[in-house]
Amino acid sequence: MKRTILILLLFSNLAFADARQIDDYQWEGVERIVAIGDLHGDFTNYLATLKAAGLVDKKGKWSAGKTHLVQTGDIPDRGPDTEKIIDHITKLAKQASRKGGRVHSLIGNHEAMNVFGDLRYVHEGEFAAFETKNSARLRDRYYDLYLQSLEAHDPETFANLPENFRDEWNVRHPLGWVEHRQAWDPAWDADGKFSKWVLDKKVAIRINDNLFLHGGISGFYCQNSLDSITEKVVGKLAHYDPKNPGVLDDEFGPLWYRGLSGVEPHALPETVDAILAHHKVSRIVVGHTPTSGIVWPRYDAKVVIIDTGIASAYGGYVAYLEITPGGLYAGYPPGKLPLPVSDDGNIAYLEQVIQMDPKNPYLRERLETLTHPPAPVPMEAVEGEEPVPAKPEAKPEAKPIPICGISK
């Protein structure tokens, strides 16, 4: 018996020893992978997800050994705890590395939006977190500079500013706003806390035979390498040009694309297969498109959607994806379920998740949708999420989606 245990231990150690990093974007031989989706400023549910997956101990410190954790982007916006989450996940990455594990934080569309200044979804608590005793003085100085620039470049508008303009301007620029921009915008501060953090991250990575990214890969980016995808996004973020945002607002780009997740125009099966073949993987794992409480497989689990709505702004549905040599598993607070590898098993799987969370109305709506399919959902109207930026030249009728091409 002791000899058998020893042999099993030796085999386990050999398996872990096979884990290796191929380059900055690829790892092989990883025994356990946990992937979690959009967090949107909710530290409490972020930590609850880590604990449910057995990644951290009671004190929130790494306890998962050589596991690789992948967070597929959209840490900021809609909640007040972005800084708290980034600080924790940064420390967690260091703790995991010391144990032989890894934490991979990917760039989502909301990281990008904060960097280039689209602040529509920034929670008021995010600005308040940056407020100091000097915030009022700093904002006054920025306001003066703004007026000077406006007078120099648009004197007519400057001359006709309404009497209440300053009050309205203050509403759009609450205390802490200036410091928030200094932290996020590399044009304000190249060493800003968050801009530097984002620009050091990847858009897409491969671990074993799994490809991870935030939105998805369309036919336009099918043949792009992992490094070229990241270089395109990071390059545009580092030197943002509002007149030529390129990939940053491309509805078919890796930060925004929802076609793999079932939103029209959805990806053709041939495109999915071409992406898998190009990157030598078996599946693609994405966030970005809310599922309202379920880790959801598509295309016979060649695509897995993990934006379950962890943040309270989206329902607070704690869940994660686990990938091991034994298979794919969807983890929920009550326990784990095997993920079906055929679409034929999706209904039975969904019924099991409903049993775990019978009060979630969206799961029953999904079940009804599966049994009585509705008309396709247009890309511009995904419930609970902001409209995807759309450029006229990017619309399907003007720019047919190739089955598998390469972006320029």
Image: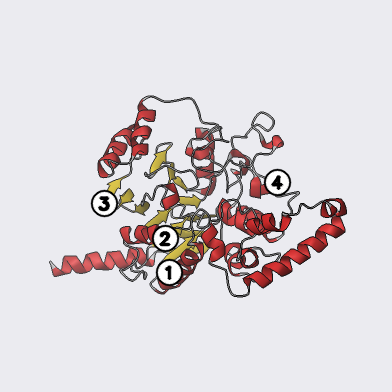
Which numbered disc covers residue 148? none
- Of residues 110 and 29, the one nearer the viewer is 110
Report, in whole angstroms, how far the alpha carbon at label 4 lies from the one at label 1: 36 Å
Whichever of callouts 1 and 2 sits on the residue coming sooner in the sequence is 2
Q: Residues within 10 Å of mark 4 (few under 14, many from 20)?
A: few
User: Label 4 amino acid?
Assistant: Lys
Identify the residue position indicated by label 4 in the image: 408
Does any portion of residue 233 appear in the rendered image?
A: yes
Identify the residue position indicated by label 1 in the image: 92
Q: Nearer the viewer, mark 3 or mark 2?
A: 3
Q: Is residue 50 left or right of residue 163?
A: left
Does any portion of residue 30 appear in the rendered image?
A: no
User: Label 3 amino acid?
Assistant: Gly
- Quarter of the picture containing the N terminus is bottom left
Whichever of callouts 1 and 3 sits on the residue coming sooner in the sequence is 1
Q: Residues within 10 Å of mark 1 (few under 14, many from 20)?
A: many
Percent from the top left, x then y, of residue 64? Answer: 34, 66
Q: Are marks 4 and 1 in contact (CB under 8 Å)?
A: no
Percent from the top left, x then y, of residue 378? Answer: 55, 31
Mark 4 residue element: loop
Report, in whole angstroms, how far the alpha carbon at label 2 lies from the one at label 4: 31 Å
Mark 2 residue element: strand
Q: Is residue 110 left or right of residue 311?
A: right
User: Label 1 amino acid?
Assistant: Leu
Mark 1 residue element: helix
Identify the residue position indicated by label 2 in the image: 69
Whichever of callouts 3 and 2 sits on the residue coming sooner in the sequence is 2
Q: Are marks 1 and 2 in contact (CB under 8 Å)?
A: yes
Which numbered disc covers residue 335? 3
